[in-house]
Image (cartoon, rainbow, N blue to C red):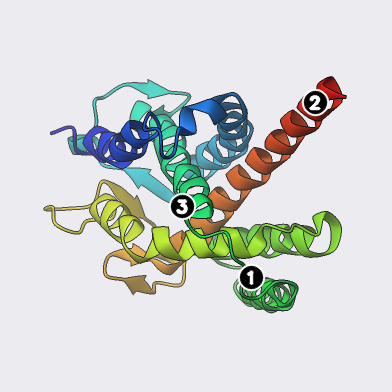
Amino acid sequence: MYAYLLVNLFSIFLPLVLSFTPKFNFRKNWSVLFPSILFTGLFFIAWDIIFTKLGVWGFNSEYLLGIDIINLPLEEWLFFIAIPYACVFTYSALNQIISRKFFDKSIFLYTTVLAAFLIIMSILNLDKLYTSVTFLLTGLFLLVHVYILKSDYLELFFRAYLLVFLFPFLLVNGILTGSFIDTEIVWYNNLENLSIRIFTIPVEDFVYGLLLFLMNVTFYEYFLNKRMLRKSEIAT
């Protein structure tokens, strides 16, 4: 049963189809999207390889094709293409539908509070690799957005994050962690996390997903702005 492959295909199918519609026409941004997925993917794949080797998580061969690349199943590599594609498409599409900001500069305060909470939780759980590393990296990355990048799209990102993680994430990650099927596709060593689950999903996955999503959006916005600047220079 190739469940992990089907999860990847299910995740990307609708966003990919909608990318060709006149309303969204997301394919016009592929030239900035795929470098974003590549650079983010390199970081997460390296992290994945290390944590798999350390036994922080692993994969159930019953649901895999049986093709491994650098000790990771092919499906895991595809995950870092399919999920970011779906997430960034949602981010872009939502921005087209609702461009208004409700929190504006106050989003920096809320983001700082969230970052501080994550960093404190990381320090309090240094004995749990998944918790400490994920919370620390995410907290620090959020602070980079607030105090260094001063990102004007943070509110737009969080809006898309909430939409994605209210339903699609619960379904997709739920299946990966054992919901609706006999056993999990991706297993976790509970000694390395808080052992707090929402349905079958470790709470750390919500933070890991935030970092994955935000890093893709960060590169996407960077390359998008570079393209716009290049076009304006040509126009002048």
**Position in image of residue 197 (x %, y %):** 34, 71
Residue marked by disc 1: 122
149 relative to 162 in the view: left or right: right
Query: Residue 68 or 154: which is nearer the viewer?
Result: 154
Q: CA distance from mark 3 to mark 1?
A: 16 Å
- Specify the amino acid type for callout 3: Val
Whether residues under marks 3 and 1 lie with C-beta atoms below 8 angstroms apart, the answer is no
Is residue 6 shown to the viewer in this render? Answer: yes
Which numbered mark, 2 or 3, is in the foreground of this view? 2
148 relative to 126 in the view: left or right: right
> At 59% from the left edge and 73% from the top edge, which residue is drawn?
125
Which numbered mark, 1 or 2, is in the foreground of this view? 2
Q: Secondary structure at mark 2?
A: helix
Is residue 192 shown to the viewer in this render? Answer: no
* Circle number at residue 230: 2
Q: CA distance from mark 2 to mark 3?
A: 44 Å
**Position in image of residue 168 (x %, y %):** 32, 55
- Specify the amino acid type for callout 2: Arg
> At 33% from the left edge and 71% from the top edge, which residue is drawn?
198
Q: Secondary structure at mark 1?
A: helix
Q: CA distance from mark 1 to mark 2?
A: 41 Å
Query: Residue 34 or 159: which is nearer the viewer?
Result: 159
Residue marked by disc 3: 56
Crowd band around label 2 with a 10 angstrom C-alpha radius: few (<14), some (14–19), many (20+): few
**Position in image of residue 35 (x %, y %):** 62, 27
- Specify the amino acid type for callout 1: Ser
> At 41% from the left edge and 62% from the top edge, which residue is drawn?
163
Quadrant in the rendering for residue 170 = bottom left
- Between discs 2 and 3, the one toward the N terminus: 3
- Between discs 1 and 2, the one toward the N terminus: 1
